[in-house]
Amino acid sequence: MSTTKLAAGSLFPKFDVDQYGGGTLHVGTPTGGHDWQMVVVYRGKHCPICTRYLNTLNDLLDDFHGQGVDVIAVTGDTADQADGQLSDIAPKFPVGYGMSIAQMQSLGLYISDPRSAAETDHPFPEPGLFIINGDGAIQILDISNAPFARPDLNVVLGGVKFVRNPENNYPIRGMHD
């Protein structure tokens, strides 16, 4: 399998998906008066680690908003699968579902096939986290090929606070050719 990974500092490839609860979610476009956006890609209903991650995201949402960061999550799950997971989480942030394989590939995500029908019934994205700055560029990214390798959201929040502090003059890292 060959994939193209997104580069730090590159423009985030914006796209739309259906939004849990109705409407359309514009991935890569901050809302709510925020100038940055964090996009959390999660595997889906079959992943208990994703459920814990989304619950932690709920707990930290006000802190991310306090840093000017809009927060959304997206998955390849269907509407029914998303509802089966999110009804218990009651996310305070927008969640998109039905990501296509082409959209997953545009983000450079690893994509897995289910181990069995008991897991899920479609290919799904492995975890990804993208923080998009006010210029639409990828300030921070993390792409994993397994559910147990993803950044600690408290550490990410601390990093965002540091990067957003103008006194630190912190550039996008990882841009050496």
Image (spheres, helix red, strand yellow):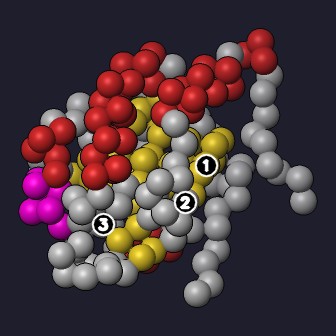
**Camera-nearest residue between 138 and 125:** 125
Per the model, the C-alpha gap separating discs 3 and 2 is 16 Å
Name the amino acid, label 2. Ser
Q: Please state the extent of the stretch shown in magenta in the rendering.
A: 78-84
Q: What residue sits 10% from the left and 55% below the top?
A: 84
Residue 10 percent location from the top left of the image? 68, 55
Q: Which residue is mark 2?
A: 144
Which residue occupies 28% across, 52% down? 48
Under tag 2, what secondary structure? loop
User: At which x and y percent is residue 6?
Assistant: 64, 62
For the residue marked with disc 1, what is the amino acid? Leu
Write down the residue under mark 3. Answer: 76
Residue 153 located left or right of residue 16? right
Q: Give the residue type at disc 3.
A: Gly
Residue plotted at (41% across, 67% down): 125
Q: Quadrant of residue 134?
A: top right
Mark 2–mark 1 Cα distance, whole angstroms, equals: 10 Å
User: Badge 2, how many Cα within 10 Å: few under 14, some, many 20+?
Assistant: some
The residue indicated by pointer 1 is 141
| Quadrant of the rendered image containing residue 167 | top right
Residue 13 appears in the picture as rendered: no
Return the disc, 3 or 2, that comes first in the chain's sequence: 3
Nearest to the eye among marks 3 and 2: give it: 2
State the SS at label 3.
Answer: loop
**Magenta residues: mostly which secondary structure?**
helix
Q: Secondary structure at mark 1?
A: strand
